[in-house]
């Protein structure tokens, strides 16, 4: 899609919903990722059961998106034409950023859909179980049943963090020291 400056009033109105103004101006990747981050910031606290801790994330994403859209909309024409439609994280990571090919995207989407499906299945099973389990027993079981999705999510986050650390260590160990630089402690 061709990026183009649009009506300033409509751009401002669209900038109230994260990602919408970017999409309105033709930056579809940029707008879509901002919109996904915004709605994920609502979903994340609900899934892990820690709304108080992550509520600030909603505001950070909203403010970033609002001012990001305003900066793009108010840029000079020649500067605007130089802006490329990229995923939002590529703006921060530059050329070393996350490269997404269609296979990676498909795997991530599949994983997210599986997690959403398992969560919905868990909620439905617990809704059915409440009908068949006596109320006195359910009052004892419910705290455990309601905590399982948050525990599973926490475990997945820890595993992902460990995988990222291992990947970073491997990439750092794969790089060699430039020639001519020696360890002075070896003398």
Image (tube, helix red, strand yellow):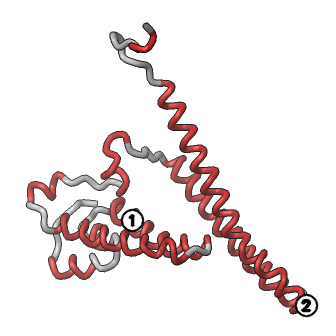
Query: Quadrant location of residue 146?
Result: bottom right
The residue located at (73%, 70%) in the rendering is 148
Please state the horizontal and vertical placement of residue 153, each as a whole percent of the image: 64, 63
Name the quarter where the N terminus is drawn. bottom left
Q: Is residue 80 above or below residue 13?
A: above
For mark 1, what is the residue?
32
The dot on residue 134 is: 2
Looking at the image, residue 91 sits to the left or right of residue 161; the answer is: left
Could you say whether the residue bearing mark 2 is in a helix, strand or loop? Answer: loop
Please state the horizontal and vertical placement of residue 65, each as a whole percent of the image: 31, 69
Q: Is residue 135 above or below residue 163?
A: below
Looking at the image, residue 37 sits to the left or right of residue 67; the answer is: right
Q: Nearer the viewer, mark 2 or mark 1?
A: 2
Looking at the image, residue 185 sits to the left or right of residue 75; the answer is: right
The residue located at (71%, 73%) in the rendering is 147
Circle 1 Cα neighbour tier, 10 Å, few/some/many (<14 / 14–19 / ≥20): some
Please state the horizontal and vertical placement of residue 40, each as a whole percent of the image: 49, 69
CA separation in Å, label 2 and label 1: 46 Å
């Amino acid at each position: 899609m061709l990026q183009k400056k649009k009506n300033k009033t409509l751009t401002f109105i669209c900038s109230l919903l994260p990602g919408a103004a970017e999409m309105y101006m033709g930056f579809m990747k940029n707008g879509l990722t901002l919109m996904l981050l915004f709605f994920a910031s609502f979903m994340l606290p609900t899934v892990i059961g820690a709304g108080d801790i992550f509520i600030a994330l909603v505001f950070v994403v909203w403010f970033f998106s609002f001012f990001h859209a305003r900066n793009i909309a108010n840029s000079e024409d020649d500067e605007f034409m130089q802006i490329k439609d990229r995923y939002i994280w590529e703006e921060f990571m530059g050329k070393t950023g996350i490269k997404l090919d269609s296979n990676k995207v498909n795997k991530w989407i599949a994983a997210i859909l599986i997690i959403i499906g398992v969560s919905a299945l868990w909620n439905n099973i617990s809704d059915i179980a409440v009908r068949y389990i006596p109320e006195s027993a359910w009052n004892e079981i419910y705290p455990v049943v309601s905590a399982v999705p948050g525990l599973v999510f926490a475990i997945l986050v820890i595993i992902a963090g460990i995988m990222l650390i291992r990947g970073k260590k491997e990439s750092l160990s794969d790089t060699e020291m430039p020639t001519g630089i020696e360890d002075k402690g070896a003398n």
